[in-house]
Image (cartoon, grey):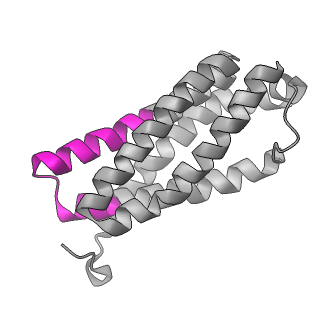
Amino acid sequence: MKFDIDKISFKKIIASILICFLPALIGSVFTYPAIPNWYASLNKPFFSPPNWLFGPAWTILYLLMGISFYIIWKRGIKSKEEKNAVYIFFVQLILNALWSFLFFGLRSPFLGFVCIIFLWFSIALTIWKFWRLEKISGILLLPYIGWVSFASILNFFVWILN
């Protein structure tokens, strides 16, 4: 099935985007209070981006994730392959929120690193599954895995340096 931009279901696309922003909302409960004190006091590698960059980067990524999910949802979630792809997509959303809890909430770069490795693999599997169903859905998730790859390296060095 080809994605048809002329037949957009606005209810589904809004719901898809909101679903993808849910981990951001959950994560912010743990992230924002920890940034000015705990996170600011950590030793970070030289390539650590400025804090202001994370918000815009994640906003774009969650938006792309929402569009990617919408394309899969729009085609229908009837077959075993489609259901499996969506299940894995939701697993990575849960891991995304869990990372914030572990890293910032529990203040554990080690547990955050363990989680982000599982997150990376679940994103890779989601990309593969979505790509097989609708190529554009997989492509839209490539910036996400790129950012999480970078975040994994950053998380590793924060853990090692502290």
- Start and end of the magenta stretch? 70-94
Q: Position of residue 136 (x, y in %)?
A: 37, 69
Up/down of 76 relative to 102, above or below? below
Quadrant of the frame with the N terminus: bottom left
Give me the residue at 82% from left, 18% from top. 162
Give me the residue at 88% from left, 26% from top. 43
Q: How many numbered discs?
A: 0
Q: Position of residue 9 (x, y in %)?
A: 28, 70
As drawn, is 15 to the left or to the right of 76?
A: right
- State the residue in front, 73 or 79: 79
Q: Residue furthest bottom?
A: 6
As drawn, is 106 to the left or to the right of 88?
A: right
Magenta span contains residue 133? no
Q: Position of residue 128 (x, y in %)?
A: 34, 52
Name the chief secondary structure element in magenta: helix
Give me the residue at 21% from left, 42% from top. 84
Up/down of 125 relative to 100, above or below? below
Give me the residue at 37% from left, 55% from top. 16
As drawn, is 9 to the left or to the right of 106?
A: left
Q: Evaluate whether residue 93 shows in this view.
A: no
